[in-house]
Amino acid sequence: MTTKAVSSAARLPDELAHDHYPCRDEAGRLTVDLGAIAANWRRLSGLYPSARAGAVVKADAYGLCAERIAPMLAALGCRDFFVAHLAEALELKPLLPDDAALFVLNGLAPGSEARCAQAGIVPVLNTPEQAEAWYALAKRLSQSLPAALQVDTGMSRLGLSESELDHVMTWPDFDRLVGLRLLMSHMACADAPAAAANANQIASFRRFADRLPWVPRSLANSAAALALPETTGEVLRPGLVLYGVEPGPGGASGMRAAIRLDARVIQTRTIPAGTSVGYSFTYLATSSRRIATISAGYADGWPRALSNKGAVWFQGQRLPLIGRVSMDSCVVDVTNLPEGHICPGDTVELIGPHQSVSDLAGLLDTTPHEILTGLGRRFARDFVNEPPAGAVERVA
């Protein structure tokens, strides 16, 4: 006699198994407005007609999904994309047009040069060693290989010094074997436009550029593109501002917010005076309070440093965080809402019209980049307002 295997999985009626009953058991939802990102790129393209606006899509487009954002920008006319690592470039390469350039900002790990060249990806050469390895491969293949050169104008992070650049340019046929697409550097204080360091870096970059007058220049990051027109060069490298996040205290006039983050209410309850909340009992209720537990914690990128000082929003009402932010949840005070007005299954705004990424960064004395890139993968991502293919053209 044969025994029929029985699955332990529950069988659901067809009407409950269909897509019109989507799962809502994630920590929350990160909504990415692709139309806003497109509008921001177009505005940057129009600021300086003599320059091309590229796109920094490293770290998965700052955590917002490079696989969706980069091809969308390419459809609008963007042709210069910047990532940090070769692995990121290899993932994006098949999704972009053949005439799009992918630049690897950190340069190449030793031994990865051939793979990079075969894929048609452009390394940013930051050290004499990186430059020598790329130059040696071009000599071995007897063909010109494209690259960018990064020079150090004062940040002391990546890039060739003036003497190192002079030395590299003495190598026989270097300028023929290494096809220089860009000369790059990075602004350290562009988010403070009046800082004296900006003028020093700009002057230093001009000295480098004078050595290589035929090479297109790229100096302007998000903040510089908005506030320091003298950094324009031929290619802009916007990152944060593309996603509608202010790169500094001066804001981002005319740019559209592109993200919203909402998290689910798990539980509500009333606690009496004298009750503690959260790890280490860092909050003690001095009166009867109504509280709600929210499905977002530091494992989701909702920083633990917000404990007892951050807030979320519900229907325009600020709800202060109380107690410590846990790995998977946090607690807010809902006493000022009418009783029963907020219930399990409702969602609250973590980032949105009432609280921006920059607001959170200012509260925590950190950079908006850290907040944005830290948002965990447990938040479901919705992509809205994607421009129809061919509906938007690059601003001339």
Image: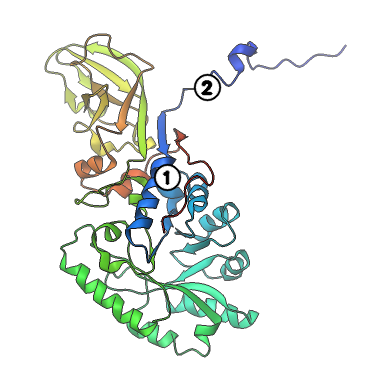
Answer yes or no: is residue 12 visible.
no
* Displayed quadrant of residue 309: top left
| Residue 356 or residue 133, whichever sits in front | 356
Residue at image location 39% in from the left, 17% down from the top: 345
Q: Is residue 247 above or below residue 219?
A: above
For the residue pair 34 and 276, the one nearer the viewer reads as: 34
Q: Nearer the viewer, residue 51 or 346?
A: 51
> Which SS class for mark 2?
loop
Residue name at image x 47 percent, y 56 percent: 78
Tell me: residue 322, above or below residue 108.
Answer: above
Amino acid type, callout 1: Gly
Q: Tell me if residue 303 comes above or below residue 152 in the rendering.
A: above
Judging from the image, what secondary structure is the residue with disc 1 in? helix
On the question of residue 40 being in view, the answer is yes
Q: Amino acid at mark 2?
A: Pro
Mark 1 crowd level (few <14, some 14–19, many ≥20, 10 Å Cα):
some
Marks 2 and 1 in Cβ contact (< 8 Å)? no
**What residue did someone put label 2 on?**
22
Q: Could you classify mark 2 by the number of other residues whose Cα lies within 10 Å: few (under 14), some (14-19), or many (20 or more)?
A: few
